[in-house]
Amino acid sequence: MTNPAEPQVAHWHGFTQMADHDSLVIKDGEGCWLTTTDGQKLFDGVSSLWCNVHGHRHAKLDSAIQAQLQRVAHVTTLGMSCQTTDDLAKRLTELTPGDLGHVFFSSDGSSAVEAALKMSFQYWQQREDPRPQKTRFLALGSAYHGDTTGAVSLGGIKYFHQLFAPILFSPVRGPIPCSYRVPSDISVTPLEYYTNEIKMLLEKHHEELAAVVMEPLVQGAAGMITHPTGLLQNVRELCDHYNVLLICDEVATGFGRTGKMFACEHESVTPDILCIGKGLTGGYLPMAATVARPHIFNAFLARASDSRQFFHGHTFGGNPLAAAAAMASLDLLTESSYLDRVAEKGEYLRNRVISDLSGEPHVGDIRGRCMMLGIELVADRATRRPFPSELQLGRSVCRRTVRDGVWIRPLGDVIILMPPLIATEAELDMLAAVVTESIKAETTNLIKQNDSISSDA
Ligand SMILES: *Cc1c(COP(=O)(O)O)cnc(C)c1O
């Protein structure tokens, strides 16, 4: 089983049981489609893990990278720069909300979050009127901010994060602001309830808190947990009131996914620090960034001998090839009506999935925003009771869709649909149809094989 001579065993995959993994080796891609070495065409239903924006082998992105390659492939950002990267930084300050104005580049989303943690900590240590006791972070329940140790410390997904507890710092843990599983005994709206939970934590801990870290609107890896509308704005107000920074992790939600360039725009919020990644280069090359507002940036300005510079920097941060891809991607995203079209398509996909699955007894919830959808399968719709996880229903559903030409990857029993933003209505119809068929077939199979699961919905 573990013969290192086989290239597919030599390559150790992330979040994958290597003793039981379906090997899919891709030969090439075009638009929303990937072709395996066996010649099977697969629709890329999760945008190559949530990052592809304009499809594969887009002519404009390809030629932007080729043009940059004619000049230089890599230049460090420590002590020098590349015009392409400087131009991208400026462009990002124009596109990100409010006065976010200073872009610190790294290579992936986790690193962007690490930089945000260290940046906010160092800010409180050395700003005018320093608050050195502000050393902790508030993170939401079921949070996901990446896989490096600091990001995992923020993480609240039991299955990914708990194992590592002995080597992590402990955040102040907030609620899971889920609109589907709201505690049954509350006498206020979900929005008021979750806001109040966060308020109580800030009231108690604000003096030791450097920042609140959250994914705005939708917690992706948690299973597309969708917050009540208004929560982000309320958290922004609470952070201002309690003098705590707000770090928004838009690694998943950024660059059009939610129908706007950034999810924060839906609630007119400007975080103090914004983390971006995944879609930044159109999903082509590893690049991420931590974007800060002037009050953060200014706290790091001093004479060189004062040792106030940000003590952080990645070898490949700001890579020019990635920057060239990002500029080309942003050119497309900012074309007039591009994002309006994305918003329409997201609406189309949601309506299509809702109408195909309405009345399905084991579809508990269809949620998310725009082109990031989650379909949660449950054993009992009335009580929202999940299926036993060992039955791996989500996995069976996705295995079947792959046989039918659609590659998707579930999060437990939440089926994730996150197609490239360029997907056409016809492609979205096909995606919805294949996924619906698979959900129906696999839940029926599962119920047949396991009499103990009551189909009492
Ligand atoms: C994917 C993701 C990350 C981590 O990004 P990587 O590029 O995989 O390190 C961080 N935050 C959120 C919200 C994500 O979805």
Image: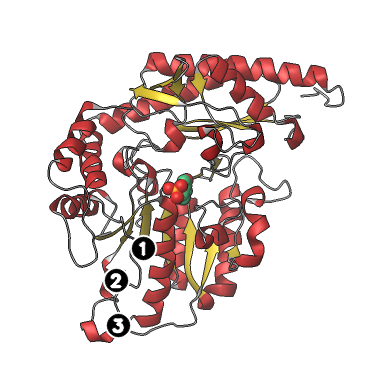
Q: Is mark 1 within 8 Å of ligand 1?
A: no
| Mark earlier in primary sequence (1, 3) | 1
Q: Is residue 157 left or right of residue 448?
A: left
Q: Position of residue 20 (x, y in %)?
A: 66, 32
Tell me the residue at 24%/66% (across/down).
Answer: 78
| Mark earlier in primary sequence (1, 2) | 1
Kind of residue at badge 3:
Ser
| Mark earlier in primary sequence (2, 3) | 2
Circles 1 and 3: CB distance less than 8 Å?
Answer: no
Q: Residue furthest front?
A: 5
Kind of residue at badge 2:
His
**Label 2: few (<14), some (14–19) or many (≥20) C-alpha neighbours in 10 Å:** some
Q: Is residue 91 left or right of residue 293?
A: left
In the image, 5 versus 200, the foreground residue is 5
On screen, 59 above or below 190?
Answer: above
Q: Which mark is residue 272?
A: 1
Q: Is mark 3 within 8 Å of ligand 1?
A: no
**Label 1: few (<14), some (14–19) or many (≥20) C-alpha neighbours in 10 Å:** many
Spatial separation of the CA atoms under disc 1 and disc 3: 23 Å
Q: Position of residue 339 (x, y in %)?
A: 29, 33
On screen, 344 above or below 369?
Answer: above
Q: Quadrant of residue 348?
A: top left
Circles 2 and 3: CB distance less than 8 Å?
Answer: no
| Residue indicated by mark 2 | 295
Circles 1 and 2: CB distance less than 8 Å?
Answer: yes
| Residue indicated by mark 3 | 307
Kind of residue at badge 1:
Asp
Tell me the residue at 61%/23% (across/down).
Answer: 399
Spatial separation of the CA atoms under disc 2 and disc 3: 18 Å
